Amino acid sequence: MNLIVCVKQVIDPEAPPASFKIDPATNKATVQGAAPVIDPYGEYAVEASLKIKEAKGGKVTAVCLGTALQREVVKKPLSMGADDLVLLEDEAYVNGDTWSTASALAAAIKKIGAYDIILTGREASDTNAGQVGPAIAEILGIPCATIVKKIEILDGKARVERMVADGYEVIEIPLPCVLTITNELGEPRYPTIKGIMMAKRKEPIVWKPADLGVDAAKLGASGSRAKMAKLFQPVKEGKCEIIGGDTPEEAAAKLAMRLREAKVL
Amino acid sequence: MADNMGVLVFCEVTNGKLAGSAAEGLGIGKQLAASLGQELNAVLIGSGVNANADMVASLGAAKVYVADDPILKDYQTDPYIQVLQKVAAEMKPAILILGQSSVGRDLAPRIAFRLGSSATLDCIELAIDPAGKKLLMTKPVYGGNARAIFTSVTMPQVVTIRTKAMTPAQPDPSKKGQVIKVDAGLTPDSVKAKLVNKVAQQAEGVRLEDAAVVVCGGRGIGGAEGFKQLDELAKLLKGATGASRPPCDNGWLPQTQQIGLTGKIVAPELYIAIALSGSSQHMSGCSGSKTIVAINKDPEANIFREARFGVVGDWKKILPAFTAKVKELLAA
Ligand SMILES: Cc1cc2nc3c(=O)[nH]c(=O)nc-3n(C[C@H](O)[C@H](O)[C@H](O)COP(=O)(O)OP(=O)(O)OC[C@H]3O[C@@H](n4cnc5c(N)ncnc54)[C@H](O)[C@@H]3O)c2cc1C
Ligand SMILES: Nc1ncnc2c1ncn2[C@@H]1O[C@H](COP(=O)(O)O)[C@@H](O)[C@H]1O
């Protein structure tokens, strides 16, 4: 099995909301006091690819597009057990939309050559788009299943479970295909000491637009079909009435009475 | 690009009935069509969905495209794309609206890219820019910490709308639409990713999406046992029990009870948040609630920035006393 997994470097989505700021000059978001991380659903996708590799054998290649990629962050898939890491690191790749991002990733996937399953997260924690996986499928002309929580490889196809509102669906999808992965898959594994040592030694492969043979006009901002006109933080009123008491039990009773008074109960 | 005109709403049908997103899509679709001075149309896809066409017309669609075929009985990505492609080729809409459901999430990006365009998912506001007549699409990003307004360079402008974010259209039975049959030339080969089974995992009692009261627990509840106490309060208030992501990940309650950005979106009258921190991703699923009440031992927890009423303390002490007092008040 040739497995390709797409992971992204993002600002920490678990940082307290109060530390989240937007720089109006650059329209970029930051969190104070937290280092960047691998996008969490991308990490579930890495876990999914490693599970397939364990069951069927093969090779896992991680691909990451961005700039200022911190090696200790983007090497996490390697320390978890991936075999190779390809970085699309160049100014030309960034500030695009899901389409131009997917176009570059698809070009890299074609250059890698052999692929049976391409895995992405169900949505990145910054864009909350859920589109890069489906876009890769459209570009490569292969089928795609989204929000997948379980994968079983059969002969020439995969049997996957896809989360829906009231349960899950079982889908059989021919290979090669794209799968977008959800947290119901189960927690990603921790890197092992051996994995960390291997990742330290492994040099990522870096591909510039010229290496992919793609036209710069198709990348980043100039290749985008959607434009972000504005990025802003919604205003919060935040006027919580804290109800106290001499004991927790008293506070609880007072809360119930206050809700009755406010006609909430 | 200048050829594209009008608004097309994909009206999802579940178990023979129109999904809530259909009326919501037609509600906002009507406004957008009016600002553009263009037509509002709809598309129904499924098996036996012909029966829903009059209802869709009464909700304001001038033309109702209907693809009624046994192959379309359950949602499968590939044939649904094929049908929408066909309808889009006939109508050339400027705007295509779907709901942010399991179906819309899967279908919207695929059809948008197939048509050479882009999609913006989970929109909470849609408006026409008076200057360029472009659609302004507002969606939460960074897990709800921020919002972004997008425009599309390409046509059609494809969106999904967040559940309960738009005012639904009201039916007017005197309104009749033109029903147009769609033959997309489907064959069994149209299906690439094939649905082989559906497994329901519904919790008993009131459905989370319909509940007027939601009692929601977080990681701090500590286990399945603790959730029984939340169930007791929910039952008393004729509501439903939900959870943030960690309790679902840990199997303390079904995965279908997760509330948030990647779970269910609820907007009850009363939302009681217990031992959860109020992460932006969680709040994305419940910030539309009328009154939020928080119980948390950490006075700095973000949930106290979101709630209307709160008690700081250990839920194990607070919840039983609160439930007892509620019982007493309701009996009086
Ligand atoms: C892209 C993305 C999508 C996500 N989607 C969702 C989603 O849909 N829904 C969702 O919920 N999360 C989602 N998450 C995860 C989210 O970021 C948080 O990790 C999660 O919401 C935290 O859950 P929690 O508040 O229960 O846990 P924690 O943040 O650990 O909070 C537990 C709280 O319990 C309190 N507590 C502990 N013990 C007690 C006690 N005895 N009495 C009173 N209080 C106590 C603590 O003070 C703390 O505030 C998503 C994350 C990402 C990156
Ligand atoms: N810049 C990127 N580099 C690598 N993978 C990405 C990138 N952007 C998105 N992805 C993948 O696509 C998934 C969905 O992203 P999105 O469509 O932006 O929500 C992520 O979880 C990643 O797996």
Image (cartoon, coloured by chain):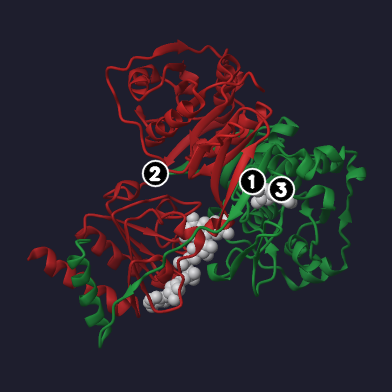
Indicate the secondary structure of the residue bearing disc 1. strand
- Taking the spot 43% from the left edge, 31% from the top edge, the residue there is B31
- Which colour denotes chain B? red
Amino acid tagged 1: Ala
Which residue carries the number 3 mark? Answer: A56
Of callouts 1 and 3, the N-terminal one: 3
Whole-number angstrom distance, CA of label 2 to CA of label 3 = 44 Å
Q: Around disc 2, counting alpha carbons within 10 Å, would you say few (fewer than 14), some (14 to 19), or many (20 or more)? A: some
Q: Which is more toward the observer, B75 or B199?
A: B75
Amino acid tagged 2: Lys
Q: Which chain is green?
A: A
Q: Which mark is residue A229?
A: 1
**Chain under callout 2:** B
B4 in relation to A237, above or below = above
Left or right of residue B302, residue B207 in this image: left
Q: Position of residue B274 (x, y in %)?
A: 36, 69
